[in-house]
Amino acid sequence: MWCVALVTLLAGVPSQAAAQSVFPPDSAVRIMLEQRVKEGRAAGIVVGLLEADGTTRVFTAGTAGAGRILDRTSVFEIGSITKVFTSVLLADMVRRGEVALDDPVAKYLPAGVTVPSRNGKLITLELLATQHSGLSRLPTNLRVSSMLNPYAEYSVPQLYEFLSSYQLPRDPGAQFEYSNVGLGLLGHVLALRAGRSYEELLRERILQPLGMLHTAITLTPELRQRLVAGHNAMGDTVPPWDLPTLAGAGALRSDAHDMLAFASAALRGTGPAAEAIRFAMQPRAEAGNANTTIGLAWIRSGTQRDTIVWHNGGTGGFRTFLGLVPARGIAVVLLTNSGGVGSDDLGMHLLEPSIPLAAPRR
């Protein structure tokens, strides 16, 4: 799971493009993607564009791995974009009256588990979702036996041990500090509150209502066949990651088709799931600089004319990006099966051309 890099500036067959597209023409998008692959910044890349009128275009370049092709149904690990889904679960449960944003996390953990506090201030569900909990980025007792799958052996008892022994460096709510363990903990306690697994809860509340049938943690045989091969920063093939305890921080896999459906629901959907997404997108706290705020996990970056609401993700072999401009009703989904620096700059540039593309590293 990759830490969000805050922005301070401020091929498949596509469907019928919007008559007055705000995005570049097909040929220009293809050139951008092919250049990324040529420069070694992506082994394979899929970009989905959602126009203001609801039409979509999907483009691909590069490779999905031996025996696989890239298209809108190619499955990628989406890494920390999972945090957005965890926040939407929180929003849904708040709207149903099952939890409250200001509930202490300890309220939903087993007796005997101590949650750190400081100066009488408690870690709440909202502080977890807004990255203001004061918890470290990673659990301090994470012992990695293989960097190829670093979270696979981390257990619930270890998570509870971490909470019971960790000393906060600052008061909860005092400062934005990105925490993978914080959002993993949030997913865990929401599942405990609902009495089902995180994946079951997500499927019931968000994925099925939005028709996201290609998004999961546990892949069916069909989805496993669509899972593209991940590559590290050196271009070597690497295995998928497993996050049994911290699933809410980065365990989801998805494709461009489903991620475009999620973006469309956020911008113009109806029903409880769509309303929960928009609730989660509302600004709630500062996030490191004057141009950036955070909702429930969603990062909100101000540009010269609009606000881009977004999150990125990364695992050992994947870098991903999801960005929306609610004021213009547009969105970009970007999925790569490559480690390294990712392609957030391309996603941002497509949403707002005044944000420049990053130069390739030499």
Image (cartoon, rainbow, N blue to C red):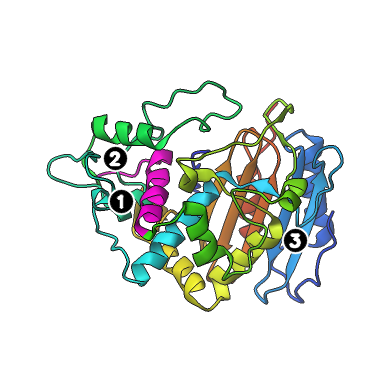
Whether label 2 touches label 3, CB < 8 Å:
no
Q: Is residue 176 rendered to the left or right of residue 335?
A: left
Q: Secondary structure at mark 1?
A: helix
Give the distance between the C-alpha atoms of the residues marked 2 and 3, in whole angstroms: 41 Å
**In the rendering, at what x and y percent does residue 172 appear?**
24, 44
Q: Secondary structure at mark 2?
A: loop
Whether label 1 touches label 2, CB < 8 Å:
yes
Residue type at the position of mark 2: Gly
In reply to whether residue 186 is colored magenta, the answer given is yes
Residue at image coords 34%, 44%:
176
Q: Looking at the rendering, which quadrant does residue 35 occupy?
A: top right
Which sits earlier in the primary sequence, circle 2 or circle 3?
Answer: 3
Q: Residue furthest top?
A: 145
Where residue 134 is drawn, which disc sits there? 2
Where residue 127 is drawn, which disc sits there? 1
Where residue 24 is drawn, which disc sits there? 3
Where residue 337 is drawn, which disc sits there? none
The magenta segment: 174-193
